[in-house]
Image (cartoon, rainbow, N blue to C red):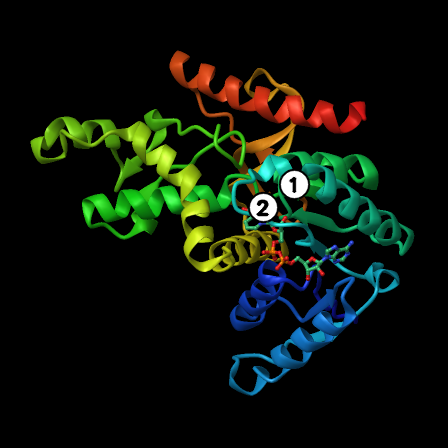
Amino acid sequence: MTINRSKVVIVGAGLVGSSTAFSLITQGVCDEVMIIDINKDKARGEVMDLNHCIEYLNRNVRVTEGDYKDCGDADIVAITAGAPPRPGQSRLDTLELSAKIAESIVKPIMESGFRGHFIVVSNPVDIIAHYVYRLSGLPKNQVIGTGTAMDSARLKYFIGEIFHIDPRSVQGYTMGEHGDSQMCPWSHVTVGGKRIKDILEDNPQYASINLDEIVTRVAKVGFEILQVKGTTCYGIATTAAGIIKAILNDENKIIPVSTLLEGEFGESDVFCGVPAILNRSGVQDVVEVHLSEEEKLKFKQSVHVIREYTNRLYDK
Ligand code: NAD
């Protein structure tokens, strides 16, 4: 009898990578977490610190320091290595450097015999996910960007805050670019099954609520956090761990992630945030919700932004 051990590799032991590792081990998502960083001291320090959590966790997760050659037996590699935007920079401004970093990572990982799933976290995530897909040659379902998964968590949190409701009782997501142009298909947002537009209509005390402002806040809040604490890490780390959990546990959970569109929503050859069913195969399917004419236009505009930068990367 063979008992398979689940192994997740995290490339990039910075704030996002180490927080992702922490989230994985505290939730006991897998058997082993291996950390790789160009800065070997940083990787070693994080591994040592994380190993000292084990006594108080609910399972003995193995945390190791590794190298690209050790990725052959990994189920998932999460790429969190990158250059976070400096004040005044957008996520898109970090494209060139992040692409170079991705190239230096994906090639040796594929040479190790890795045939699992890539979860791309590094920004600009939609474009880097496309690049990792091309570089790796893996099937499209096995390369997943975190996309608008965290933005959607923020959306639910803000809506929950307005109505004093647990964010987990809110259904909804943003789609398109993980960036300023993302949009929300409001016609599909519900709280306890009631459409948000009906809630606003039925309750005069909410008449002043501007839905567009909520989406803008979702898109901008990362920078607000960046300004006051210099980084964002817990939200994205928990999001990445949630995606990894959905894959390893074969959950069929619907999460808006960045995946390759091939005709869905009328778009092709572009990675962008759309609701997707996640299980052992990675992205099993895209949930093609019906969009209103206005929503279709906003989605198209967001895809246009991603496509422009993706082309810019390949035109170089
Ligand atoms: P950080 O600077 O704290 O850490 C980055 C790490 O990557 C460093 O430890 C660095 O040594 C390592 N690294 C750099 N080049 C490498 C290479 N070639 N090989 C291996 N490791 C390398 O940055 P952070 O705050 O952890 O952010 C990491 C990335 O995550 C950035 O691209 C950031 O924009 C992105 N991010 C994405 C989201 C999202 O929603 N997708 C949210 C937050 C941050």
Quarter the C terminus occupies:
top right
Tags 2 and 1 touching, CB below 8 Å: yes
Crowd class of label 1 (few under 14; some 14 to 19; many from 20; radius 10 Å): some
Which quadrant of the view contains residue 60? bottom right
The local secondary structure at tag 1 comes to helix
Residue 78, image x, y percentages: 68, 54
Residue for point 63% across, 18% down:
263
The local secondary structure at tag 2 comes to loop
Work out whether 42 lies above or below 283. Answer: below
Q: Is residue 300 left or right of residue 214?
A: right
Residue for point 23% across, 27% down:
197
Q: Is mark 2 within 8 Å of ligand 1?
A: yes
- Check the image and name the residue furthest to the right: 111
Amino acid identity at mark 2: Pro
Work out whether 58 lies above or below 43. Answer: below
Crowd class of label 2 (few under 14; some 14 to 19; many from 20; radius 10 Å): some
Amino acid identity at mark 1: Thr
Please name the residue that numbered disc 2 is placed on: 85
For marks 2 and 1, the one nearer the N-term is 2
Q: Which mark is residue 94?
A: 1
Front position in the image: 15 or 65: 15
Quarter, ligand 1 = bottom right
- Residue 119 visible: yes
Q: Is residue 265 left or right of residue 83?
A: left
**Cα–Cα gap, marks 2 and 1:** 6 Å
